[in-house]
Amino acid sequence: MKITLADGNTIPVLGLGVAGIPIDATAEMTGVAIDAGYRLIDTAVIYKNEAEVGEALAATKTPRDGLFITTKVWPDRYGFDEVRASFDESMSRLGLGRLDMLMLHWPAPATDLYVESWRALIELQQAGRVSSIGVSNFFPTQLQRLADETGIMPAINQLELHPYTQRLEEQAFHAANNIITECWSPLGRSRCLDDPAIVAIAEKHGRTSAQVILRWHIEAGRIAIPRSKTPERIRQNLDIAFSLDRDDHAAMAALDQGLAGKLGPDPEIAR
């Protein structure tokens, strides 16, 4: 299943996030995911495993045009020329000639370089080196500034989003501006898995808590990129061909704690 982005490109709704996967296991787990049917792989410079993702891409028999590969520029390389240089380095590590999605990893507002850096992504897209461009951890005011100053709104904003922090304000802004919401830490770093409400839904459907949460994301029109270090869970997370009912969605909605439920850093001050 895929979602169509504002730029006309399509992206799978479920992918493998490789953040936190040990470097020496990344190539194997990426290969396992692709063999299992994942077609979206999400990495970043700061994860320090782009080369290992590239190793898996070189080894797979899956055609390149059947895969969607994302990487991200870290704020220490923000600035027009630095972003382009960082991109070239990432492409070398990944072993790719074209990238499906390039993102700015954090807004890093203290440096005030994210608009200039966004212009570099726009140019890379216009040159055909990147198919789609997006951002990660941006708030609506920052997204609006990108559009106001460059005329181009990101196709995706990747956020920490899980049952305990559902980012309703950001999702509403995304919906109004044709931005797809992509969720990192979609399982809440596993802290949501034992929640009684989620366990009850899982038992009702004969599924795991992780499958319930991932299905919840997909039915809401979001992209989810769970990570896993074990082949069994990687395969299990892909097996979400079932449906949640209205009561299930109401129970999930009741778990939201707003930004108080965040487990990661505050993007307004981070990086």
Image (cartoon, rainbow, N blue to C red):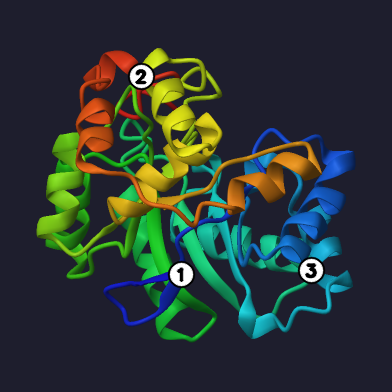
User: CA gap, disc 3 to disc 2?
Assistant: 39 Å
Label 1 Cα neighbours within 10 Å, binned few <14 / some 14-19 / many ≥20:
few
Mark 3: amino acid = Leu
Measured from the top left, where is residue 34 in percent x and y? 73, 64
- On screen, 2 above or below 109? below
The disc, 1 or 2, on the residue closer to the chain's N-terminal end is 1
Query: x and y percent of residue 35 in the render?
Result: 78, 65
Image marks 1 and 2: residues in contact by CB distance under 8 Å: no
Secondary structure beneath label 1: loop
Considering the numbered disc 2 on the image, is that residue within a helix, a strand or a loop?
helix
Compute the Cα span from label 1 to label 2. Answer: 27 Å
Instruction: Give the image location of residue 247, x and y in percent.
Output: 21, 34
Q: State which tag comes first along the sequence, 3 or 2.
A: 3
Q: Residue at x 83, y 40 (%)?
A: 23
**What residue is disc 1 on?**
1
* Numbered tag placed on residue 197 in the rendering: 2
Q: CA distance from mark 3 to mark 1?
A: 21 Å
**Front of the two marks 3 and 2:** 2
Q: Is residue 83 above or below residue 202?
A: below
Quadrant in the rendering for residue 90: bottom right
Is 205 in front, or is 125?
Answer: 205
Residue 150: image tag: none
Q: Looking at the picture, tell me which residue is in the foreground, 110 or 19.
A: 19
Is residue 167 visible in the rendered image? The answer is no
Q: Secondary structure at mark 3?
A: helix
Please name the residue that numbered disc 3 is placed on: 57
Q: Nearer the viewer, mark 3 or mark 1?
A: 1
Q: Residues within 10 Å of mark 2 (few under 14, many from 20)?
A: some
The quadrant where residue 116 appears:
bottom left
Horizontal arrangement in the rendering, residue 132 relative to residue 149 (left or right):
right
Residue drawn at the location 81% of the way across and 59% of the way down = 31
